[in-house]
Image (cartoon, rainbow, N blue to C red):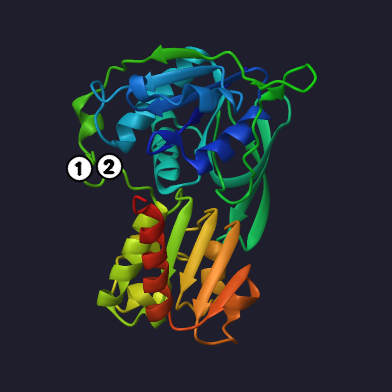
Amino acid sequence: MTVLTLVELDGTEPADASLRALTLGRSLCDPCLAAVVFADSANLPAAALAGYGVTDVYVIEPGTLEGYAPQAWARVLAGLAAETGATAVLAAGTDRGNEVLAHLGAITGLPMAANCTLVTPDGGQTHRLVRHRWAGLLLEDAVMEAPVALFTVATDSVASVSAALPSGGTPPGPPVLATISVHVHKPELAEADLVVRAVESPAGAGGASLATARVVVGGGRGVGGPDGFAPLEELADLLGGVVGVSRVVTSEGWRPHRQQVGQTGTKITPVLYLACGISGAIQHIAGCAGAKHIVAINTDPGAPILAHADYAVIGDLHQVIPALVEALRARRAPA
């Protein structure tokens, strides 16, 4: 049995959300876990993928398919699923993962389940699923009957766990990685598959998405206005992260909706979420609860977000953020 997993990249490394999807995918097959990566084979993170149990990688290089084209990506997955005899195709529950798998379902006529937290084969062509509904406020038990199961993995539901085994010896040696085979795949695509395509400019190619970023610097009403986000942007850049916002910020038109964190925005799972001037309404907490560490900066010691924060700074973000930026610059300055 083969399970295909669409792997998104954060720079040159697998995105954390994709590592979580690989972890779930590994529980569905033994030993054929295959990854599909749209990237240059020269920069393929093969060792990282092998560490999560991937045995085969199908690489679609930019020379064959440049940029992000959801229907074309889905067409590639459909062809590979047929070629490998895959029993399941999965992706992280990111914007891209959900969009591509929805296209794949439309192309193949197969059902697709989004934001799953648990998938269990139940014999034959049946899988039992548990998935998020209502932004994770409700868990639904479902049964999928299909020759090939299509689903995405909720980005905050599965911990990413390496499959590497410790080697023997005293003391133990380095981890033993799975043997991995790399296949450069050149699909045949129709012009209709490329009608919708986004080609990232070099200036924006290195940025992580909100759903996959390891660091998110969030701003709320306390930022004060559109101009107040400049220090947060600088801090996010220094930390290698991205900026997120609360719903009130998008309602005021200060920032675009794609940056909204929350029940009606994006659910995030960073290692660090720095919440600046955000009160912490329940809808916002639903979007950031998957963060491993939450640090809140707020002038209000009674702000609801403090009950969810690992650390809190009670102070004016307009003083705290510049101080953080200055400290980070000093650490980066040559001695």
Determine which residue is flagged by label 1.
201
Q: Which quadrant holds residue 161?
A: top right
Residue 115 visible in the shown view: yes
Which residue does the image show at 35% across and 67% down from the upper left?
232
Q: Are marks 2 and 1 in contact (CB under 8 Å)?
A: yes
The 10 Å Cα crowd at callout 1, few under 14, some 14 to 19, many 20 or more, is few
Who is closer to the viewer here, 176 or 114? 176
How far across and how far down the image is residue 194, in percent? 22, 32
Q: Is residue 5 above or below residue 139?
A: above
Label 2: which secondary element: loop
Q: Secondary structure at mark 1?
A: loop
The image shows residue 158 at horizontal and vertical percentages of 64, 45
Lateral position of residue 12 relative to residue 193, left or right: right
Q: How far separated are the C-alphas under marks 2 and 1? A: 6 Å
Q: Is residue 2 above or below residue 269?
A: above
Where in the figure is residue 14, as x and y percent of width and height? 47, 35
Spot occupied by residue 91 in the image (x, y as percentages of width and height)? 50, 37
Instruction: Say which residue label 2 marks.
Output: 205
Judged from this view, the residue extending furthest toward the right is: 170
Q: Amino acid at mark 1?
A: Ser
User: In percent of the image, x 57 and y 33: which residue is there?
Assistant: 22
Q: How many marks?
A: 2
